[in-house]
Image (cartoon, rainbow, N blue to C red):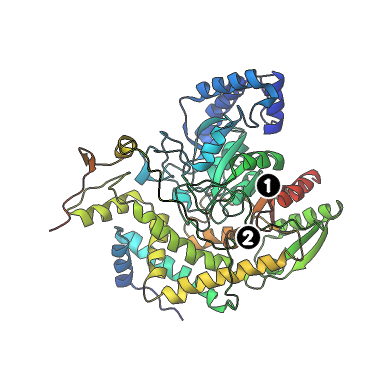
């Protein structure tokens, strides 16, 4: 019997090389666990029918190559339902793509396949990655494995819950405004949003293309780093992706953590704030200095985001028209086909954002909203670059509250959007950001996880991993 | 000050976006949009002196040679398999000209 609770990628790797268990044994242990937990949690929408064959292949490679085998060989993964795996369904949590079968591999999947991991199945998500609680999937909500009355966060709630329930060792999610980090925080695991362009977006079903990034979720910073190293790098199919950073930044580290002044203007749960302050104190004991950094415009990041993201989403989702793939509902003529297909295929939040995006791009409002937001985004990005002259990393709580109750925010879209207020700035600036578990708070007599977020300069994931591991070790 | 959205404007936007809404959705959206637009209007206070590159680092054109096409037809089957309606090797839609 393999003990999954304390298992990590690096530990599993050692056991696989030493022959303590095979990839087949490991896969069986995860399948068993998924069978027990998934009916309650709903983290997986589908467990693939070929997982044992994948594991057998990994075992052949491990047997032949020993410790020369690829780093993630035989490691069981969950992948978010918006990341394409050729000839597998990718529904994006939506009815409009219910029967869509991917015609190619995403860039990140192509890179991962070189390692021969085991893709266990596709994980649930908010429809088109639009949500912060995973209550907006067309295939049912996901429950937080740590407290089933609460949300796992979103939109990568399925991937986060899959790892947290010991239903996978690692997962791929996507982060447009916090969709990897916020669920990682809510589920007590580690999640990374890489620098914009570090991981190919090819084959990630697009929401807002100037923000979207695929990112890993796992139990430790080291595991997240291993997955990040496997999936990052240039892909000719995504012209924004890079291998070598276009800007060299190898400044010596001063072990300085910046705390943005905008935290004081935000409504943050008292216990979450205390937890954050304690985490900083613990880092001080490890030689880090903490100082306040000024980011005067960054406090408007969420407002900027809720103009630019719907604008890009309304454009990206125009492709779902019932012609080339996905659902088609038949109307009286071609125009009516479009209107009915999209009316029946999209859920309320997707419609809301498409119409909002159409509004901010329409002739009368383009300058007041879209153009202004583009310029504000540049100001905020510049502020972050300047702030990193004073600090190696910038830290905040990952989320303003602990995991909230299911149903608590579904009636009020704006309240749901505010769950991303601390994660969105990194997407606005295109910088990398890591969420690491930082203790717990007590609610209704139970412990709930809280995360600390570290944001780094462009291309400096290495700095995040270093401070993330220090924070992990100080707990 | 941003003018609040009325029903006629919402219906026009939904038509532009090719989206059918139920009457309940339409009513709910109007209230949601007015709350959201009020919130995002705070961007008017952002000082936008910085007209420099931002966001995703230095902007640059990414070009490639227009060559090495794939063999004609190699993706036809897998792509057409996803089309809701097809005829021979074409996707089929209702007539476009009235």
Which mark is on residue A449? 1
Q: Residue at 47% across / 53% down in the picture?
A: A130
Chain identity of mark 1: A
Could you say where residue A465 lies in the image, as x and y percent from the top left? Answer: 72, 47
Q: CA distance from mark 1 to mark 2?
A: 16 Å
Q: Quadrant of the rendered structure where residue A28 is?
A: top right
Question: How many residues crowd mark 1 within 10 Å: few (<14), some (14–19), many (20+)?
Answer: many
Quadrant into which the C terminus of chain A falls: top right
**Residue A111 x, y percent position in the rendering:** 55, 38
Q: Is there any visible trace of residue A189 in the rendered image?
A: yes
Decide which of B38, A170 is in the foreground and name it: A170
Q: Position of residue A116 (x, y in %)?
A: 57, 29
Say whether marks 1 and 2 touch (CB < 8 Å).
Answer: no
Picture mark count: 2
- Front one among A148 and A356: A356
Residue B91 left/right relative to B29: left
Q: Which residue is mark 2?
A: A422
């Amino acid at each position: 019997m393999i003990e999954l609770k304390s298992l990590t990628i690096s530990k599993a790797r050692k056991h696989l090389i030493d022959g303590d268990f095979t990839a087949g044994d490991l896969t069986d242990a995860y399948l068993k666990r998924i069978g027990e937990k998934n009916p309650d949690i709903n983290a997986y929408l589908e467990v693939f029918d070929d997982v044992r064959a994948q594991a057998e292949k990994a075992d052949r490679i491990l047997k032949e190559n020993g410790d020369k085998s690829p780093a993630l060989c035989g490691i069981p993964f969950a992948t978010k339902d918006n990341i394409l795996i050729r000839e597998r369904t990718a529904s994006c949590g939506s009815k409009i793509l219910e029967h869509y079968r991917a015609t190619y591999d995403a860039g990140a999947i192509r890179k991962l396949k070189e390692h021969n991991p085991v893709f266990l199945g596709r994980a649930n998500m908010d429809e088109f990655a639009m949500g912060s609680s995973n209550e907006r999937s067309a295939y049912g909500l996901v429950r937080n494995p740590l407290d089933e009355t609460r949300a796992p966060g979103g939109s990568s709630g399925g991937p986060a819950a899959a790892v947290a329930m010991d239903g996978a060792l690692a997962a791929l999610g996507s982060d447009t405004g916090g969709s990897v980090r916020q669920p990682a925080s809510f589920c007590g695991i580690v999640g990374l949003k890489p620098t914009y362009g570090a991981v190919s977006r090819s084959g990630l079903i697009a929401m807002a293309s100037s923000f979207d990034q695929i990112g890993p979720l796992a139990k430790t910073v080291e595991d997240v780093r291993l997955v990040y190293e496997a999936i990052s790098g240039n892909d000719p199919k995504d012209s924004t992706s890079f291998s070598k950073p276009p800007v060299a930044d190898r400044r010596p580290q001063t072990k300085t953590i910046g705390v943005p002044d905008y935290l004081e203007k935000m409504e943050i749960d008292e216990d979450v704030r205390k937890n954050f302050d304690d985490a900083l104190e613990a880092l001080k004991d490890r030689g880090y200095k903490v100082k306040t950094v000024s980011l005067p415009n960054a406090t408007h990041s969420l407002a900027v985001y809720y103009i630019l993201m719907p604008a890009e989403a309304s454009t990206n989702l125009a492709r779902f028209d019932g012609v080339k793939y996905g659902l088609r509902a038949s109307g009286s003529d071609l125009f009516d086909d479009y209107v009915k297909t999209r009316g029946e295929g999209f859920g309320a939040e997707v419609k809301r954002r498409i119409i909002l995006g159409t509004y901010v791009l329409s002739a009368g409002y383009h300058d007041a909203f879209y153009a202004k937001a583009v310029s504000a985004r540049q100001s905020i990005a510049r502020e972050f670059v300047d702030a990193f002259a004073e600090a190696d990393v910038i830290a905040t709580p990952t989320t303003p509250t602990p995991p909230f109750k299911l149903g608590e925010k579904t009636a009020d879209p704006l309240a749901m959007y505010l769950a991303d207020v601390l994660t969105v700035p990194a997407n606005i600036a295109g910088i990398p950001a890591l969420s690491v578990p930082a203790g717990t708070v007590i609610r209704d007599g139970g412990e709930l996880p809280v995360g600390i977020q570290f944001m780094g300069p462009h291309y400096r994931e290495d700095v995040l991993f270093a401070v993330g591991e220090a924070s992990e070790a100080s707990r | 000050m941003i003018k609040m959205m009325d029903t006629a404007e919402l219906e026009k936007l939904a038509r532009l976006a090719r989206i059918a809404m139920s009457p309940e959705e339409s009513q709910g959206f109007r209230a949601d949009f007015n709350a959201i637009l009020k919130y995002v209007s705070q961007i008017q206070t952002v000082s936008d002196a910085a007209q420099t590159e931002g966001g995703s680092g230095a902007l640059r054109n990414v070009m490639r040679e227009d060559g090495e096409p794939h063999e004609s037809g190699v993706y036809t089957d897998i792509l057409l398999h996803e089309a809701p309606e097809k005829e021979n090797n074409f996707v089929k839609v209702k007539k476009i000209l009235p």
